[in-house]
Image: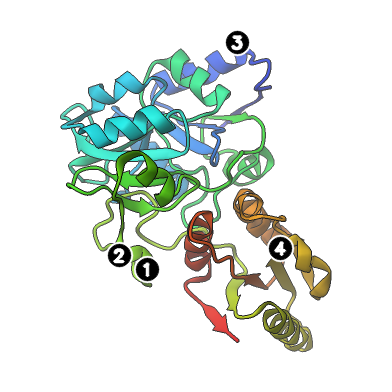
Amino acid sequence: MQTIISKIDSNDIDKNELKKHSELLKNGETVIFPTETVYGLGANALDENAVKKIYEAKGRPSDNPLIVHIHNKDLIYDLSKDIDDKAKKVIDKFWPGPLTVILKKNDKVPKTTTGGLDTVAIRMPKNDIALELLRECNLPIAAPSANISGKPSPTNGKHVVDSMNGRVAGIIIGDDCDYGLESTVVDFTEEIPMILRPGSITKKDLENVIGKVEIDPSLLNHEDNKKAKAPGMKYKHYSPDAEVFIVSGKNDDVIEKINSLIDENDKNGLKSGVLCLEKNKKKYKGKVISLGENFKEVGRNLFNSLITMDNEKINVVYSEEFLDDEVGMAIMNRLLKSSGYKVIRV
């Protein structure tokens, strides 16, 4: 497949270039575009044949639901029903932004888009290119992360082109993504809203607006939901080719353990990598990538760093643990999935 690739400046959007990709979407094709979370692989959410092309491009199981992106809050009423006051409050507070709401779908939305479920996941992205593309095509766009299924989600244009050129009809390259973690997913189909996927908008943020919010119990153990209600809840995710381990314990003990493991790997001819906070960067051996000085930076840099480790042909990656009641939960959710829940405790 010949892919149309356009580099677009978010501060000076080229409407002619954007229109090329809008026409592709209108014609039932797939287009990758930037959002504030990760790059998305989009197609007309109401066109079953177009949605099937998303699954084909990603190699994604067809029972894994997709998020539908819209450019106007009111469009939610075209796609869903039984929207309660709590859902309306968080939409008013956090849209546009990295929050996905799960609601009961109406008949307009095909089950191909919802992974066979009677619910639909919807969000309004906070990215000028994404919003302008959505306005231009005037369609709800189903868009999971723009990666091969199971691999780390791309947060910059180069990584998108490297992995997806030739697999989709169009790619829009914009700026690097602001958050680097996919959106928080909240189910509003039950009496008490429930977080199904943690993200940059936290439980505390939500409870400040609507009161009690629960966390899906599956996030606290090693098994995904057998019947996934949200994107990213089912199957292996975020995994580089390298084997990933999380090392848990006191800071000095973690550093000592990781360095000893790297020494063993060196003897066996294995290349080792380390993901850590900036303050610890110079304390490790191997290929060391600082994820940043704070958890917001860690979230933004995580997926990009995992892809970099693969590009460097690293065999084994060790990551520090990032414990925090808020954004740290989202980071650890992605890291645990990336590592296959392999944790070394010291």
Label 1 amino acid? Leu
Q: Distance between the residues labelled 1 and 4?
A: 24 Å
Q: Where is residue 266 in the image (x, y as percent from the top left)?
A: 78, 84
Is residue 141 at all visible to an observer of this figure? Answer: no
Task: Name the residue type under label 3.
Answer: Asn
The vertical placement of 132 against 237, above or below, is: above
Q: Which residue is drawn at 72% across and 65% down?
A: 313
> Which residue position holds label 1?
220
The residue labelled by disc 2 is: 217
Mark 3 or mark 1: which is in front?
1
Residue type, numbered disc 4: Leu
Quarter that holds the C terminus: bottom right
Local crowd size for mark 1, using a 10 Å CA cut-off: few (<14), some (14–19), many (≥20): few
The Cα–Cα distance between marks 3 and 1, rounded to whole angstroms, is: 47 Å
Q: Is residue 282 visible?
A: yes
**Front residue (pair 62, 331):** 331
Q: Which of marks 1 and 4 is nearer the N terminus?
A: 1
Q: How far apart are marks 4 and 3 (CA)?
A: 42 Å
Percent coordinates x, y for residue 222 in the rendering:
38, 72
